[in-house]
Image (spheres, rainbow, N blue to C red):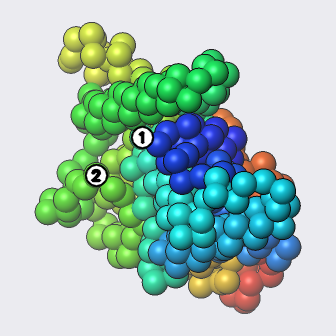
Amino acid sequence: MDNVTHTLFALTLARTPLARAGRGTAVALVLASNAPDIDIVTTIGGAPSYLMWHRGPTHGPLGVVGLGLIVAALVWIARRAWGRNRDAAQDASFAMLVPIAVIGVVCHVLMDLPTSYGTRLLSPFDWHWFAVDWMPIVDVYLLFGLAAGLLFGGSSTAGRRRNAAIVLAVMAANYGVRAAAHQQALALAPRLFGPLLPARCDPQAPDGLIDSWPRPVSVAAPQTGTRCLVELVATPTFLSPFRWRVIAHLSNAYEAHDVNVLEARFRMPPADAEVLWRTTQRYPNVWTPAVWTAASTRLGRTFLGFARLPAARAVLDQTGTTTVRWTDVRFVGAAPAAPNRAAPRDDLFTTVVRIGPDGQVLDERLGP
């Protein structure tokens, strides 16, 4: 999620019984809820460095514990340095600040997990990405609910806690609605794609709640010669919890279709199904020898380690130079385009590698 949402959520938590820990709780929660995004410092090394480390170790087990300890220490030291004239008995102890800060970091990671962007939960022990695909990167309804709860929180402690409980309940309902709509969007796939939807490449592949990538190359880009379905993905849109983009990852392409699950629920197949599949958007994904060469470059490995749905396209020009371009289909036409405004201005979701006639890599870059 965006940092404004993380901050508002932390302030909401500070109005729950966690505040009984003492003064400094709210500051610790706010700092801890934003601490994992300290990985923005990797932009010093450029956009590829940011792509490599973003939502990595700071979002994993070591980051949860380490950042929790650091935040607790900073708040405790600050309270002792600038609060000497106050009653120290009302300050949260270091022993209380540590679990409070760890809770803040954990909540940050857990709020990133249900987004289509995902997070690397087990980094640095395992660099796979995990996502649930329920939430957009910025959820305007979540932002509005959190802000309203803080603005109209009441003047008494009991009133603030009551409103915080209401806001948390509304948040849970929002997540529940999006989870149900997500499942409905996936269930509509046969009607959306109609006869274009082939059988699965692996009929035994389970459909789990949490998706993970990158997939093994043999699975992500099968070369069986037979068109088959690798996976179905439903990603949320920015404005409505009922509008989704359903993406069919095929062995040689991606096919996408936008759908409003409320409207589709009341449509009668098969007539609508015949119309729907004719408007499917297609993104080729053909792995030629040049694409495999580009995939072995440093930037290629970095991008393929990040991108969930990388569509590959290779173009040979008159000089014999091949331009290989990958685009992460998750973010084609998505709004907002970037999960963090402080990220490098390069297009993180497209990578270009140029290969000369002799097979040597001429240049590689992020961006169109």
Residue 240 lies left or right of residue 11; in this view the side is: left
Q: Secondary structure at mark 2?
A: loop
The residue tagged 2 is: 209
Work out whether residue 17 or residue 189 is closer to the camera in this orientation and state it.
17
Q: Which residue is mark 1?
A: 134
Q: Residue at x 28, y 22 (%)?
A: 273
Instruction: Give the amino acid type for the residue marked by disc 1 in the picture.
Output: Trp
* Quadrant of residue 38 within the rendered picture: bottom right
In the structure shown, which secondary structural element does the residue marked by tag 1 occupy? Answer: loop
In the rendered image of this protein, does residue 333 appear above or below residue 356?
above
Query: Relative to residue 57, is residue 47 drawn left or right?
Result: right
Residue 251 appears in which quarter of the rendering? bottom left
Residue at 36% over, 13% down: 263
- Few, some or many residues within 10 Å of mark 2 (<14, 14–19, 20+): few
Residue 134 placed where, x, y %?
42, 40
Give the x, y percent position of residue 348: 71, 59
| x, y percent for residue 154 | 60, 19
- The residue lying furthest to the left in this view is 204
Q: Residues within 10 Å of mark 1 (few under 14, many from 20)?
A: many
Indicate whether 325 appears above or below 167.
Answer: below
* Residue 42 at least partly seen: yes
Residue 343 coordinates in the image, percent (x, y): 78, 57
| Picture quadrant where residue 213 is located | bottom left
Residue under the point 27% across and 11% down: 267
**What is the C-alpha distance between the residues marked 1 and 2?**
10 Å
**Residue 133 appears left or right of 202:** right
